């Protein structure tokens, strides 16, 4: 049975918590020849998530959003417990964006007793970027996304380009495992000062928030340097220094091959993507732009 529990009364959107209910709803839509889109999220929705819903509506007749804070993609020292959970607000925002169904499983529904299978992605998952600092992260992401794609079996699934390495890991996995859903990346939405929208921006103090856009500024300057012909190592070193001067502790800022995420020595080695991660106080921000 689907539930539109009293908790969700203000939002007209349907909410299901069980895989069986998700499947029966999708099966009914399929009988009407509807195209289905899935927008996987961990909730704490912001305008970036809503832009995924809007993109999904251009690709499909029905839009499902999953909201699940996936424990397996957080390391024990990370922010799983603190991750913002705002289900009621999220359901309202999704409803206002004209979404059709929220799938909000609990941990036991996703990882039942005895759960023993993990997707271990290689390739872009081992590019030496996020994986260097979060070595178990992409196995958790790949496993939960493989499950969500299999549970919903959408025609298309949409992911933000803000998590660019994640997007490439998921696209590779979907191809490798013959998952029958098109994986679509959606451009990053930014605040007016350039800061990429992220649920983790909520962790920033007022003073940190005022400085946070320097990550985007450093990326933009570095990309300009590269386009102007500056060599990659020296452009990256200058961007690193700029981040430090703005009070960040950088983890990486690197130009990579835009598709494989392999390291590149020269500007002419195909299209490039510039990716960065840096800590501001206790908050870790990531961002990327094309070169
Ligand atoms: O990008 C996210 O919010 C998560 O990593 C995802 C794709 C929903 C998997 O939990």
Image (spheres, rainbow, N blue to C red):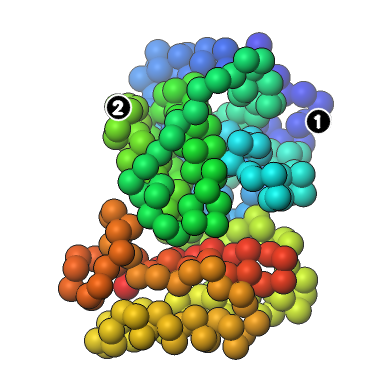
Disc 1 versus disc 2: nearer the observer: 2
> In the image, 116: left or right of 234?
right
x then y, percent, for residue 270? 19, 65
Q: In which quarter of the image is residue 140?
A: top right
x then y, percent, for residue 22? 56, 19
In space, the residues marked 1 and 2 are separated at their CA atoms by 38 Å
Query: Pointer 1 and pointer 2: residues touching (CB < 8 Å)?
Result: no
Which residue in the structure is indicated by mark 1? 7
- Residue at left offset 36%, top offset 36%: 173
Q: Which of 251/149 is in front?
A: 251
Q: Residues within 10 Å of mark 1 (few under 14, many from 20)?
A: few
Mark with earlier residue (1, 2)? 1
- Residue at left offset 40%, top offset 70%: 254
The image's mark for residue 127 is: none
- Residue at left offset 63%, top offset 44%: 74
Q: Quadrant of residue 207?
A: bottom right
x then y, percent, for residue 123? 33, 46
Mark 1 near ligand 1 (CB under 8 Å)? no
Give above or below for 202 relative to 61.
below
x then y, percent, for residue 116? 55, 20
> In the image, 36: left or right of 79?
left
Visible in this render: residue 105? yes
Visible in this render: residue 15? no
Q: Which residue lies furthest to the right in this view?
A: 6
Q: Residues within 10 Å of mark 2 (few under 14, many from 20)?
A: few
- The number of discs equals 2
At numbered mark 2, what does the secondary structure look like: helix, strand or loop? loop
Give above or below for 180 relative to 183.
above
> In the image, 114: left or right of 230?
right
Which residue in the structure is indicated by mark 2? 178
- Residue at left offset 45%, top offset 59%: 129
């Amino acid at each position: 049975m689907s539930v539109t529990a009293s908790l969700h009364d203000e939002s007209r959107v349907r909410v299901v918590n069980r895989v069986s209910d998700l499947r029966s709803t999708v099966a009914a839509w399929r009988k009407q020849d509807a195209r289905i889109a899935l927008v996987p999220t961990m909730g704490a929705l912001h305008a970036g998530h809503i832009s995924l819903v809007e993109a999904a509506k251009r690709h499909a007749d029905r839009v499902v959003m999953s909201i699940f804070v996936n424990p397996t993609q957080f390391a024990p020292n990370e922010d799983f417990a603190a991750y913002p959970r705002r289900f009621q607000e999220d359901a309202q925002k999704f409803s206002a964006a004209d979404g059709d169904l929220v799938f909000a499983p609990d941990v036991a529904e996703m990882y039942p007793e005895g759960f023993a299978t993990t997707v271990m992605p290689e390739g872009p998952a081992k590019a030496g970027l996020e994986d260097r600092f979060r070595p178990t992260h992409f196995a958790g992401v790949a496993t939960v996304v493989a499950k969500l794609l299999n549970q919903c079996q959408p025609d298309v699934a949409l992911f933000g380009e803000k998590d660019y390495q994640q997007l490439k890991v998921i696209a590779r996995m979907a191809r490798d495992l013959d998952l029958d859903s098109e994986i679509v990346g959606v451009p990053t939405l930014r605040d007016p000062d350039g800061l990429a929208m992220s649920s983790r921006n909520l962790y920033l103090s007022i003073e940190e928030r005022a400085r946070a856009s320097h990550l985007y500024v450093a990326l933009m300057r570095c990309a300009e340097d590269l386009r102007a012909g500056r060599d990659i190592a020296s452009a990256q070193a200058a961007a690193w220094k700029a981040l430090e001067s703005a009070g960040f502790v950088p983890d990486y800022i690197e130009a990579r091959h835009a598709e494989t995420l392999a390291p590149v020595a020269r500007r002419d080695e195909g299209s490039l993507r510039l990716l960065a991660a840096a800590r501001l106080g206790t908050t870790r921000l990531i961002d990327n732009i094309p070169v």
